[in-house]
């Protein structure tokens, strides 16, 4: 077991720095690494080589999960931001149910009785707190990036996840073009907000707003999975 831990300690650091690039400045990388090492230890204790998955795949999921769990336990985001996030998702859900189409940020702002600037400010606050992301929809970025062959060979993958992933993929495909592009650049190409802004020729803060609204729109459309 010690050999596994020593050999894969670099994996903990790689995942920690990958996450850190997407988190607020208040997050300390050493805290991520510490929680990740606990995840690696648990992976080493629980890994079953007869199941067919590689240890690195299994450990990566456990390490990342341990880091995210630790961040959620020490949530630095004010309750008002969580409340505003729920409010936005509910407003988008109601409007899209009523209108039967994608709603604009102007329409959501009007529904919430906010100015467009106020609405954009709330979106930026939510995104800065990173309280809504792919993980909050019930799936990890690791799962999103898996190929069909990997899914078939992964013993920790089940039919519910297959159906969920298909539903999530359909929802992402149905997003307004710019929102879908921002998510693709962020999660698939792993660009940061500043780099995406350069691609789209908009400010970093505007990319943050687009990303936040896209995630709220997805959360609203995936409500049936969030019991």
Image (cartoon, rainbow, N blue to C red):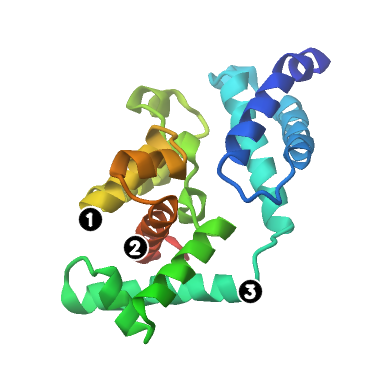
- On the picture, is 188 further left or further right than 15? left
Residue highlighted by disc 1: 176
Q: How far is disc 2 from disc 1 in space, using C-alphas?
A: 10 Å
Is residue 86 visible to us here? yes
Q: Residues within 10 Å of mark 2 (few under 14, many from 20)?
A: many
- Residue 194: x and y, percent? 45, 43
Residue at the left extreme? Answer: 100
Comes first in the chain, label 2 or label 1: 1
Of all residues, the one furthest to the right in this rendering is 2
Where disc 1 sits, the SS reads loop
Residue at figure coordinates x 55%, y 55% from the top left: 130
| Residue designated by label 2 | 217
| Residue 195 on image: x %, y % | 42, 38
Give whichever of discs 1 and 3 has the lower sequence position.
3
Residue 221, percent from left and from top: 32, 63
Q: Nearer the viewer, residue 41 or 179?
A: 179
Are dots 3 and 2 in contact, CB under 8 Å?
A: no
Q: Kindly indicate whether the residue at mark 1 contacts the one at mark 2 (C-beta within 8 angstroms).
A: no
Give the secondary structure at mark 3: helix
Residue 102 position within the rendered picture, expressed as x and y whole percent measured from the top left: 21, 65
- Gap between marks 1 and 3 measured at Cα: 29 Å
Would residue 47 be seen by someone viewing this image from the given angle? no
Where 71 sits versus 45, above or below? Answer: below
Task: Work out whether residue 185 or residue 57 is closer to the camera in this orientation and state it.
Answer: 185
Left or right side of 166 for 159: right
| Residue marked by disc 3 | 79
Q: Is residue 211 above or below residue 117?
A: above
Q: Residue at x 29, y 44 (%)?
A: 200
Q: Earlier in the sequence, mark 3 or mark 2?
A: 3
């Amino acid at each position: 077991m010690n050999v596994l831990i020593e050999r894969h300690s670099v994996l903990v650091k790689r995942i920690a720095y990958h996450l850190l690039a997407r988190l607020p400045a208040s997050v300390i990388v050493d805290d991520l690494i510490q929680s990740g090492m606990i995840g690696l230890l648990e992976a080493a204790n629980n890994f079953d080589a007869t199941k067919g998955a590689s240890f690195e795949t299994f450990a990566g999921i456990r390490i990342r999960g341990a880091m995210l769990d630790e961040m959620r336990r020490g949530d630095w985001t004010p309750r008002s931001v969580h409340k505003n996030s729920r409010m936005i998702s509910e407003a988008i859900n109601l409007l899209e149910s009523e209108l039967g189409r994608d709603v604009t940020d102007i329409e959501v702002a009007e529904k919430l009785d906010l100015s467009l600037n106020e609405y954009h400010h709330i979106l930026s606050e939510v995104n800065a707190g990173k309280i809504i992301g792919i993980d909050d929809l019930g799936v990890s970025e690791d799962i999103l990036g898996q190929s069909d062959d990997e899914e078939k060979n992964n013993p920790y993958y089940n039919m519910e996840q297959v159906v969920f992933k298909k539903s999530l993929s359909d929802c992402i495909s149905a997003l307004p073009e710019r929102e879908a592009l921002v998510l693709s650049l962020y999660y698939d190409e792993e660009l940061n907000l500043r780099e995406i802004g350069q691609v789209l020729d908009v400010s970093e803060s505007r990319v943050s707003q687009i990303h936040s609204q896209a995630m709220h729109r997805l959360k609203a459309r995936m409500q049936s999975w969030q019991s």
